[in-house]
Image (spheres, rainbow, N blue to C red):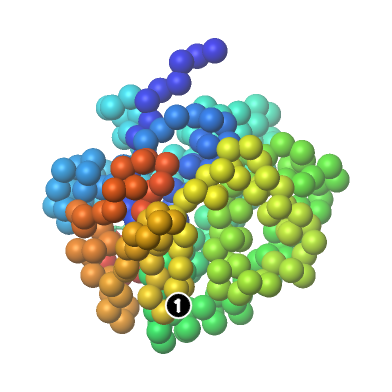
Amino acid sequence: MTELPRLQLIYFKLRALAEAPQMIMHYANVPYTYEMAWDFYGKPWPEAKPEVAFGQLPVLVVDGHTHIWQSGAITRYVATLTGTLPDDPLLAAQVDAVFDSTQELFPPLNPTVNVTAGDVHEQRKEAFLDSFPATLKNFAQQLERTEDGPFFFGAKPYYCDFSAYHHFSLAQMLKADILDPHASVLHFMAAVESLPGVSEYLASRPELIDVGTEPKLVINKGGGIATALVVGYKIVLANALNNEKLAPSIVNPRHPVRLACTNSSGLPG
Ligand SMILES: N[C@@H](CCC(=O)N[C@@H](CS)C(=O)NCC(=O)O)C(=O)O
């Protein structure tokens, strides 16, 4: 077997674009470290940002020297290391199509859940909940095309399945029964949750609580809580993206702490 490269996943305190690669690596038991931006770059995010290709995270650092940005590129690369990218180019293209469809859920959904509060949250939540059922129906129909599920392309999960799980589970945080009209989707969620490695990851990652009021992650189940500071629309970056002192438990890279998501303007994407 080819030796695996050394993998460092650099990101913020968010349950967002690093979820699919992390779930995949846990599923395939591929070692990696999860490093906060300020730890990896050794400076607050606004100072590090100009040095980062395209100025955003996540970035995957491979063997200490090659930096891959864009969550899609990271996920596809990780898929090549984990057996979650099909060998057949036609099947790979179909998997990619489902993956890209899940990525389209990112901009409205991830910041709404991770960052916004109050009226902004309510407006964004309402807009998302209006549009999501039609999109979800498309995903359900795709799942139902596969006779030997429970995953999008049969009994084996590919990288698109992990991204779909992440986005669907965030949608459930906005409305707990949102997936219920589709038995195939519920079956899919349960199947992902019981994958080896994934179930342990999901059980051990920080809990995201108080969505819509004051979103925060419970750093460790024993007590530490990191609170996002949300001022209307704008995140106070000093807390979310900078070198905030964190509870000791997060030195374990498998227990990342993530809170907020912004685009280049500093506003939720
Ligand atoms: N298209 C990019 C989007 C990356 C992105 O929006 N990253 C946000 C966090 S979720 C970020 O780096 N925000 C900080 C900034 O823009 O300064 C991807 O998929 O990786």
Q: Circle 1 sits on which residue?
A: 212
In the rendered image, the quadrant that contains the C terminus is bottom left
Residue 260 location (% of width, % of height): 35, 63
**Residue with the most extreme top position:** 1
Quadrant containing the N terminus is top right
Q: Is residue 29 above or below residue 103?
A: above
- Residue drawn at x 34%, y 59% is 224
Residue at horizontal 42%, vertical 66%?
Answer: 114
Residue at horizontal 56 percent and vertical 43 percent from the top:
200
- 10 Å crowding of disc 1: few (<14), some (14-19), many (20+): many
Is the residue 169 above or below the residue 120 in the image? Answer: above
Residue type (three-letter) at the residue carrying disc 1 = Gly
Res. 111 visible in picture: no
Relative to the observer, which residue lies in front, 101 or 229? 229
Look at the image and tell me whether residue 203 can be seen: yes
Residue extending furthest bottom? 119
Give left or right: position of 28 versus 185.
left
